[in-house]
Amino acid sequence: MNAVGKIIAAWGLVIALAWSYLHVDKINFFGTGFTTSAMVWWTVLMVALVLATYKWFPNAKQNKVVHAWTLILAVGLLVNYLNLYNILPASLQLYSYYHTWLLLGAIGFAYTAMKWTPKSAPIYWTAAGLNALLLVYALVAVTDPFFNAYSLLLAGLVQGVPTLVDGLVNYNG
């Protein structure tokens, strides 16, 4: 697997595992203690991956897809921290964690499908569609017990798995 595949696979694996960790530790999801530790943990992982991407991904500084995902991460983290510190309006607070990431994921995966390699496009179009579908379900089913029980695992599946698959399947040479 080449350097591009390793970075892409690392993103997929870390994203899937991070969402899974959040699921396991979901007790009192909206409680300050969990949310603060989850946000710090999530931020550290994302910053580490961004730094690794810019260090080892060939031509990362000139790559528009890398720039787009860096911006997406910054926006997602900003929204999450604005909510954490009660800066967002109360009407938006319920929607500022996984809803934000699903929306940004749908946008990011669609952009990646349009700008990345043709061999990866079907994977990213599928990921964009799955993120959009899960976002719609999340908006409709905010109080659904099934959604509340499995929302974070589902987010990990629709964001981490496609990225992991792309890294493992399309970059073996």
Image (spheres, helix red, strand yellow):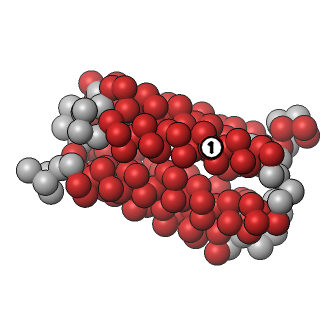
Say whether residue 173 is left or right of residue 127: left
Q: Is residue 31 above or below residue 109?
A: below
Observer able to see residue 33: no
Which residue is tagged 1? 133
Of residues 123 and 4, the one nearer the viewer is: 123
Q: Secondary structure at mark 1?
A: helix
Of residues 64 and 35, the one nearer the viewer is: 64
Q: Quadrant of residue 99?
A: top right
Of residues 59 and 114, the one nearer the viewer is: 114
- The location of residue 123, given as percent across then percent down, is 36, 44
Q: Quadrant of residue 23?
A: bottom right
Image point 53% across, 31% down: which residue?
107
| Quarter of the image with the N terminus in it | bottom left
- The location of residue 13, given as percent across then percent down, is 40, 62
Say whether residue 150 is left or right of residue 51: right
- The location of residue 16, given as percent across then percent down, is 48, 61
Give the amino acid type for the residue marked by disc 1 in the picture.
Leu
Determine crowd level at label 1: few under 14, some 14-19, many 20+ residues with C-alpha closer than 10 A. some
Q: Quadrant of residue 125?
A: top left
Residue at the far left: name it.
Answer: 173
Observer able to see residue 31: yes
Say whether residue 81 is left or right of residue 15: right
- The location of residue 31, given as percent across then percent down, is 83, 63
Q: Total label count? A: 1
Image point 60% across, 64% down: which residue?
153
Image point 23% across, 39% down: which residue?
119
Image point 35% across, 39% down: which residue?
122
